[in-house]
Image (cartoon, coloured by chain):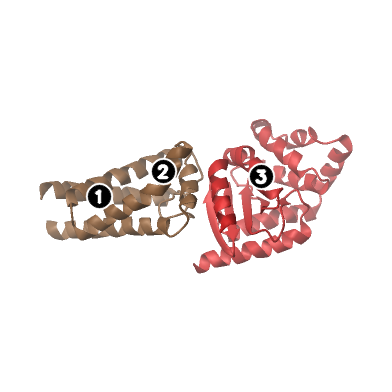
Amino acid sequence: MIRRFTLAIVCAAVAVVQGQTLPSGRAIGPIVAKVTVDVYSDFQCPHCKALAEQTLTRVKQDYALKDKIRLVHHDFPLPGHPYAKQAALFAAAADRVGKFEQVSEALFKQQDTWGANGRVEETVDSVLTPAEAKKVRDLVKDPSLMAVVQRDIDLGTRLNITSTPTIIITKNLKSERVVGSISYSILARYLDQQLAQ
Amino acid sequence: MIRGLRLLLRLLLGAVFVYAAYTKLRQSWLLFALSIDSYQLLPEWAVLALARTLPWFELAVGLLLVAGAWLRSASIAGTLLLALFFGVMVWSYARGAGIDCGCFGVGEALSAKTLARDGALLAAAITLAVMSRKS
């Protein structure tokens, strides 16, 4: 019980900080939303790809963009995935030019390709204009960007996250976590239930 | 000696089943449905049906074991349930699914530790079922 409450407090504190510092790409929906869904994800993880493409895209459309919930992306690159951190950095850099959504979609879509050859930059460039691509390449070298990614990793570690994707659903300072890829329909039922209560 | 061991096993397994049921029933059944869904083994209707009924089945088996009523049937049901859980968990762990165990509600990752625990409980349940057959 105390652990759950602590988890909820940490999530709420992070939400406040992120609401002030993060551009909209990583956090969608009002900061005062009744329900917050925090997703700890790794761009090189196949289950994260499945969750992002089959579930979170629809959650974003049907809930976050309609201001019903707040959906927050957190980077949690796993040590076993050699290019995951680099991908997280590029996504964070793309966020600074307003292209987080496009870049994260491309990273998941072409996960097999860059996951095998390590050419993360090529995937990122494919959805950016040449000017944006240049800016993103410069931004990736910015230490403050690394701090953004590291902050998520540190937070995930503090929350005892060990695998991805991990979804933390918080309502009224009470958090529940679900690990793994889950279907949209059941998650939507759960969110509807939480929003109705 | 045998009677003592049988008493110990049925109380242990009964308590585990009752606790497992309690952890699932005290939270939204849809949260348990999400946990089952993360195994990606069943269609939606089966996930929902299982999430609704499994905790009650666990509770019934647990209470019967603790009470010592219909011991043979309860121990066989418990063994089959644990064998099913163990099989699914081993399969999911082997394919590298980083998911929740779902054993005692949500929030416990599937790991070698959870497999060892479930394996030990399965061994205890098989022993109890065999002992109950002989009685």
Give the foreground label among 1 and 2. 2
User: On the image, numbered disc 2 is attached to which residue?
Assistant: B49
* Chain letter behind tag 3: A
Query: Chain B appears in which tint?
Result: brown
Q: Name the residue under label 1.
A: B125
According to the colouring, which chain is red?
Answer: A
Observer able to see residue A192 = yes
In this view, A162 is above or below A20 = above
Residue B110 image point, x, y percent? 45, 48
Count numbered badges in the picture: 3
Residue sitting nearer the eye, B21 or A47: B21
Q: Dot 1: what SS?
A: helix
Task: Determine the chain carrying the residue at label 2.
Answer: B
Report whether B52 appears left or right of A68. left
Residue B106, x across and y down, in percent: 47, 54
Q: Quadrant of residue B46?
A: top left
Look at mark 3 in the image and give the residue it sits on.
A62
Q: How crowded is mark 3: few (under 14 residues within 10 Å), some or many (20 or more)?
A: some
Residue closer to the observer: A58 or A196: A196
Q: Residues within 10 Å of mark 1 (few under 14, many from 20)?
A: many
In the orientation shown, which residue stands out farthest toward the front? A196
